Image (cartoon, grey):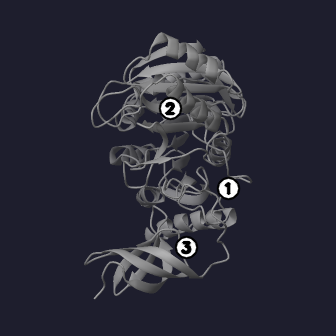
């Protein structure tokens, strides 16, 4: 009978969606962090349940060629699940994850090699650090609310390391307490750092539960002046209980209330609350692939559904006659319109509302798209929207997805309702994680009108 503490020798055959290795032990799955498919290891059981087990690797007995040295000392963080897998192996893994999802739905189409980064480090332009009494500053451990103190993160922009160091020093020097979640007392709750990768501008947002003394704030401004590229220092007040990071009130302490950045020559203004893609370099790769698959010739009407702040719509506008973006979140639509004005783009329009409601209304009014781009959340497209797309029959449908399983589900439905799946391209937006972004192209089946 299996029991905690027991040593077993197993071979890993696959990974969970969180990157843990899966072996089979007496007919039940055994989950082991840090062991890759094809590897054999001696494992100490840490949890034994009737239907599954957890274990901790004690000794790696057989390694695969794709294994590399762990680059991070903060192993409890859990943010980068594929740290011990080489970049080339990660790219092939993500292609296989997409292939498996498509095949599970009976779909067959050309799947390109994953479009990855040559240097997959320091790629994130937004960092959110939690702060706890100590002060301790870092990230929450996997599956917990336990803070892992982090001095440097290899996937965050380098400037964040200096920001964290200076704020920790400032809190100690000025006796500014960290927020205590259990007692609901204290001050500093979170630190958010946003970087304009192409502009070089840096925004620091200090999230507090109470306003520090003015003398302390003056000292904070003075100390953060050493941060290269600092353009905006904002105090965000969040007095609510719960896990939400940002509160509704911002106070500008120094510089500008927003920073700028650009994607493929398009300018964007980024405020503390703005949604903006976390990996701008790969965002350009992703959107160029979507534009390539759209094959715009200049006369088309394009629908951009779940358009967010309008990034894809603005990309498409340079090749299309007219672009209509639809998004549920009002603040995102406000940002989308502002971004269109910032770039003097006049052939786009943005509508606030649920795509599954607005698209049928536009279709009923005679507004028909030649090309549709959808970029839904992880749950995929609403069934009512899919039904409208099937009735509309656009010539080309470009599906941008962050979840291979819901993508495959929706693609299977669409191929049963008048479309042909032509190709799919995985894109590595988040190196060292299990996340897979995909751009897939469907065309109207010949004979369909």
Tell me the quarter of the picture where residue 211 sits: top left
Q: Nearer the viewer, mark 1 or mark 2?
A: 2
Q: Would residue 3 be visible to someone looking at this image? A: yes
SS class of the residue under badge 3? loop
Does residue 91 appear to the left or right of 398 in the view shown? right
In the rendered image of this protein, does residue 28 appear above or below residue 260?
A: below
Residue for badge 3: 36
* Residue 309 coordinates in the image, percent (x, y): 52, 29
The residue sitting at the top extreme is 214
The Cα atoms of the two marked residues, 1 and 2, are separated by 32 Å
Q: Residue at x 50, y 34 (%)?
A: 307
| Label 1 environment density (alpha carbons within 10 Å; few <14, some 14–19, many ≥20) | many
Contact check, label 1 and label 3, Cβ < 8 Å: no
Q: Nearest to the eye among marks 1 and 3: give it.
A: 3
**In the figure, is residue 103 to the left or right of 109?**
left
Q: Which residue is mark 2?
A: 191
Q: Tell me: residue 142, above or below residue 31.
A: above
Q: Nearer the viewer, mark 3 or mark 2?
A: 2
Which of the two discs, 1 and 3, labels the residue nearer the N terminus? 3
Q: Is residue 249 above or below residue 107?
A: above
Q: Which residue is mark 1?
A: 115
Residue at the image position 51 percent from the left and 53 percent from the top? 79
Where residue 337 appears, x then y in whole percent? 53, 20
Task: Please report whichever mark, 1 or 2, sits nearer to the chain's N-terminal start.
Answer: 1
Disc ID at residue 394: none
């Amino acid at each position: 009978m299996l029991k905690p503490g027991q040593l077993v020798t197993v071979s890993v055959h696959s990974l969970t969606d969180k990157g843990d290795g899966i072996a089979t032990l007496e007919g039940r799955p055994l989950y082991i962090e840090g062991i890759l498919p094809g590897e054999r290891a001696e494992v100490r059981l840490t949890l034994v349940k009737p239907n599954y087990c957890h274990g901790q690797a004690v000794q790696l007995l057989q390694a695969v060629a794709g294994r590399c040295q762990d680059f991070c000392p903060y192993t409890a963080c859990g943010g980068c699940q594929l740290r011990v897998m080489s970049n080339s192996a990660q790219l092939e893994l993500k292609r296989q994850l997409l292939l498996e999802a498509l095949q599970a739905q009976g779909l067959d189409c050309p799947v390109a090699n994953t479009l990855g980064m040559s240097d997959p480090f320091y790629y994130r332009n937004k960092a959110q650090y939690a702060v706890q009494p100590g002060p301790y500053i870092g990230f929450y451990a996997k599956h917990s609310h336990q803070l892992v103190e982090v001095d440097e993160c290899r996937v965050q922009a380098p400037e964040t390391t200096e920001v964290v160091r200076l704020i920790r020093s400032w809190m100690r020097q000025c006796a500014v307490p960290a927020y205590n979640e259990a007692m609901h007392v204290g001050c500093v709750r979170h630190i958010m750092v946003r970087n304009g990768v192409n502009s070089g501008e840096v925004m620091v947002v200090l999230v507090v539960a109470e306003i520090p003394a003015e003398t302390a704030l003056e000292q904070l401004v003075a100390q953060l002046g050493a941060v290269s590229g600092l353009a905006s220092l904002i105090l965000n007040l969040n007095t609510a209980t719960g896990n939400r990071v940002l509160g509704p009130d911002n106070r500008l302490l120094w510089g500008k209330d927003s920073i700028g950045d650009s994607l493929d020559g398009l300018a964007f203004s980024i405020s503390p609350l703005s949604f903006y893609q976390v990996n701008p370099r790969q965002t350009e790769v992703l959107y160029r692939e979507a534009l390539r698959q759209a094959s715009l010739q200049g006369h088309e009407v394009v629908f951009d559904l779940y358009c967010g702040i309008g990034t894809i719509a603005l990309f498409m506008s340079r090749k299309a006659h007219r672009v209509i973006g639809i998004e549920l979140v009002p603040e995102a639509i406000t940002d989308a319109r502002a971004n269109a004005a910032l770039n003097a783009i006049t052939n786009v329009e943005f509508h606030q509302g649920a795509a599954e409601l607005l698209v049928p209304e536009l279709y009923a009014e005679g507004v028909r798209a030649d090309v549709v781009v959808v970029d839904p959340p992880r749950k995929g497209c609403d069934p009512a929207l899919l039904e409208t797309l099937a009735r509309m029959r656009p010539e080309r449908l470009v599906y941008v997805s962050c979840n291979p399983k819901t993508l495959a589900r929706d693609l299977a439905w669409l191929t049963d309702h008048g479309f042909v799946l032509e190709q799919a391209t995985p894109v590595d937006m988040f190196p060292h994680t299990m996340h897979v972004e995909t751009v897939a192209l469907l065309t109207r089946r010949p004979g369909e009108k």
